Image (tube, helix red, strand yellow):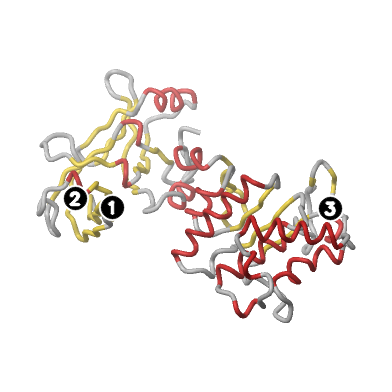
């Protein structure tokens, strides 16, 4: 719809303060990078890069300058005389991005541009796009299912489900303050753990979450938000990210789980546990581990910090703080 390839059924679309609902795609000053590169196979890289400029009747001298500049930025100068079939996937994707940026568009639309690349190349290209974003003053709208891409590339993230916008915010905002259980589960890898619990007000008038035998008084900022919303005692879903759970082998108000799978990831170990009938993942730095302390079948105690607790309504899934 931003590109003009689909008609907008309702609402208004502005590009650079100009209403473009009824403006033809070619007049919107946008460029698009497709998932499958969409390069012309019979043209060389240089001809592919020149093509959108020829359509706009840009003078040859300016065209050469723009093409060389884009090729320099993307590191494809040495491939200008090759045809796309002689290039690797990463090189083709650079050409596709180059063809978009030579036009110097107001908006650059990217439709999952890295999904056809292998993991190593995807990481490389992600870094290239971040550098490119810093060098050219253009708005990027980037569609992805890979939340690592969204978190690393985005200034602002729009999370959608079934065509409905769930949350808009900076990567840090959607990670630290998910608006509902869908966002909480979608952002963060591995995803947030969810436990059945109860929100109670203790004898000091403080909000606390009770899970099994454990009771955790939530942090002051969370207290203030829950109080401002007039939240009452109720059953809740309690969320905690794997990296925010701490192990503790001291008996007391701790939650307990049994290790079912242990994944060594290098700098950390991902422990998959059964805790209170739920699957749960804890990330433990390898430096904190004794050699055989957390083998499969071992029972461990764990807790989470008062500021790392997320409290959701079990029916609507809404975060009760917001």
Question: Which residue in the structure is indicated by mark 3?
Answer: 21
Using the image, tell me which numbered label, if any, was put on residue 243: none
Q: Earlier in the sequence, mark 3 or mark 2?
A: 3
Res 244 → quadrant: top left
Q: Measure the alpha-carbon separation of dots 1 and 3.
A: 47 Å
Q: Nearer the viewer, residue 216 or 52?
A: 52
Q: Earlier in the sequence, mark 1 or mark 3?
A: 3
- Callout 2 environment at 10 Å: few (<14), some (14 to 19), or many (20+)? many
Mark 1 vs mark 3: in front: 3
Using the image, tell me which numbered label, if any, was put on residue 257: 2
Q: Measure the alpha-carbon separation of dots 1 and 2.
A: 8 Å
Q: Is residue 150 left or right of residue 273?
A: right
How far across and how far down the image is residue 315, in percent? 45, 46
Mark 3 vs mark 2: in front: 3
Task: Verify CB contact (< 8 Å) between mark 1 and mark 3.
Answer: no
Disc 3 element? loop
Question: Which residue in the structure is indicated by mark 1?
Answer: 280
Res 304 → quadrant: top left
Relative height, residue 203 to residue 111 (above, below) = above
Task: Verify CB contact (< 8 Å) between mark 3 and mark 2.
Answer: no
- Residue at figure coordinates x 44%, y 65% from the top left: 119
Task: Verify CB contact (< 8 Å) between mark 1 and mark 2.
Answer: yes
Disc 2 element? strand
Which quadrant holds the N terminus?
A: bottom right
């Amino acid at each position: 719809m931003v590109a003009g390839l689909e008609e907008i059924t309702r609402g208004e679309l502005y590009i650079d303060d100009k209403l473009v609902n009824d403006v033809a795609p070619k007049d919107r000053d946008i460029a698009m990078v497709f998932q499958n590169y969409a390069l012309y196979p019979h043209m060389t890289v240089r001809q592919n890069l020149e093509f959108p400029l020829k359509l706009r009747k840009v003078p040859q001298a300016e065209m050469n300058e723009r093409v060389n500049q884009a090729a320099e930025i993307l590191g494809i100068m040495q491939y200008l005389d090759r045809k796309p079939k002689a290039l690797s996937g990463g090189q083709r994707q650079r050409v596709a991005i180059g063809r978009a940026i030579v036009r110097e568009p107001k908006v650059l639309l990217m439709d999952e541009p890295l999904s056809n690349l292998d993991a190593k190349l995807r990481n490389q290209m992600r870094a290239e796009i971040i550098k490119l974003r810093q060098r050219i003053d253009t708005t990027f709208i980037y569609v992805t299912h890979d939340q690592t891409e969204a978190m690393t590339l985005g200034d602002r993230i729009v999370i959608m489900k079934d065509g409905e916008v769930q949350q808009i915010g900076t990567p840090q905002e959607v990670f630290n303050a998910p608006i509902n259980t869908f966002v909480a589960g979608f952002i963060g890898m591995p995803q947030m753990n969810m436990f059945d619990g109860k929100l109670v007000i203790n004898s000091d008038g403080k909000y606390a979450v009770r899970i099994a035998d454990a009771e955790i008084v939530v942090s002051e900022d969370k207290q203030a938000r829950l109080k401002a919303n007039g939240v009452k005692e109720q059953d809740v879903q309690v969320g905690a990210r794997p990296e925010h759970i701490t192990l503790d082998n001291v008996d007391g108000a701790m939650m307990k789980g049994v290790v079912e799978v242990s994944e060594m990831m290098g700098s950390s170990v991902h422990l998959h546990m059964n805790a209170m009938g739920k699957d749960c993942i804890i990330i433990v730095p390898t430096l904190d581990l004794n050699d055989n302390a957390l083998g499969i079948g071992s029972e461990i105690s764990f807790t989470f910090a008062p500021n790392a607790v997320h409290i959701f309504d079990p029916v609507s899934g809404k975060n009760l703080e917001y």
